[in-house]
Amino acid sequence: MKLRLNKIVVGIFILIIFNSCSQKHEFRGDWGAIDSYGSYSELCFSDSTIEIYDELAGSIASQTYSSKDDSLITNILSYRMNWINADSLNLVSDTFMLRMMRIKTGYKLSDYTDENDRATYTTAFYNRMDKWKKKELKPSDGMNSNHKTEEEIIEIGKQN
């Protein structure tokens, strides 16, 4: 009886640890993002920096970031993180929103190491952008507004 009780306690303990670890979301990696103006970008998060490639500006200077609780702080803005799942989230500031999805396949920004990779990366970038924008709401549907209420963000997240 005592051995059985110990197994149950150990099993519950392992389940609690596994569950708490599985709820932790990881930024590290490549993400596609549409901002509140309808512009597409790709971001590569390392331990403390973000590399960005934007459809309008091309490569943007690296930014540093940190995350704490439900906030992401960059050297430009602070965002509230609204995780939809481990591969999808919305970053929301007072005037700006980024809707982000993890990039899992294809030639990614993290693969881009020098100018020899430029054509390969930009082709993959524009293919992903075209696919994403075909699925997204059009600016006339409200995606170009500067500020979203929390209810609108939750509704957008449910559409995925």
Image: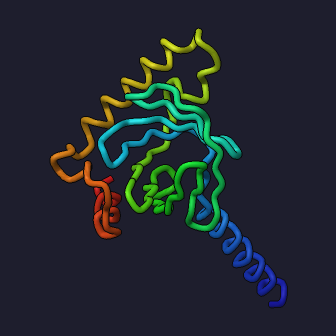
Comparing 43 with 83, the one in front is 43
Looking at the image, residue 144 sits to the left or right of residue 2; the answer is left
Q: Residue at x 37, y 24 (%)?
A: 126
Looking at the image, residue 99 sits to the left or right of residue 112; the answer is left
Quadrant occupied by the N terminus? bottom right
Name the colour scheme: rainbow
**Residue furthest toward the right?**
3
- x and y percent of residue 92 in the render? 43, 59
Q: Residue at x 27, y 43 (%)?
A: 136
Q: Residue at x 65, y 45 (%)?
A: 64
Q: Kindly indicate the quadrant of the structure image that contains residue 138.
A: top left
**Residue furthest toward the top?**
116
- x and y percent of residue 53 in the render? 49, 30
Q: Residue at x 44, y 22 (%)?
A: 124
Comparing 25 with 33, the one in front is 33
- x and y percent of residue 83 in the render? 48, 60
- Determine whether 44 is above or below 146 in the image: above
Comparing 59 with 116, the one in front is 59
**Residue furthest toward the bottom?**
1
Looking at the image, residue 81 sits to the left or right of residue 116; the answer is left
Looking at the image, residue 91 sits to the left or right of residue 145; the answer is right
**Residue furthest toward the front?**
76
Q: Tell me how many marks there are.
A: 0
- Determine whether 16 is above or below 104 in the image: below
- x and y percent of residue 147 in the render? 32, 60
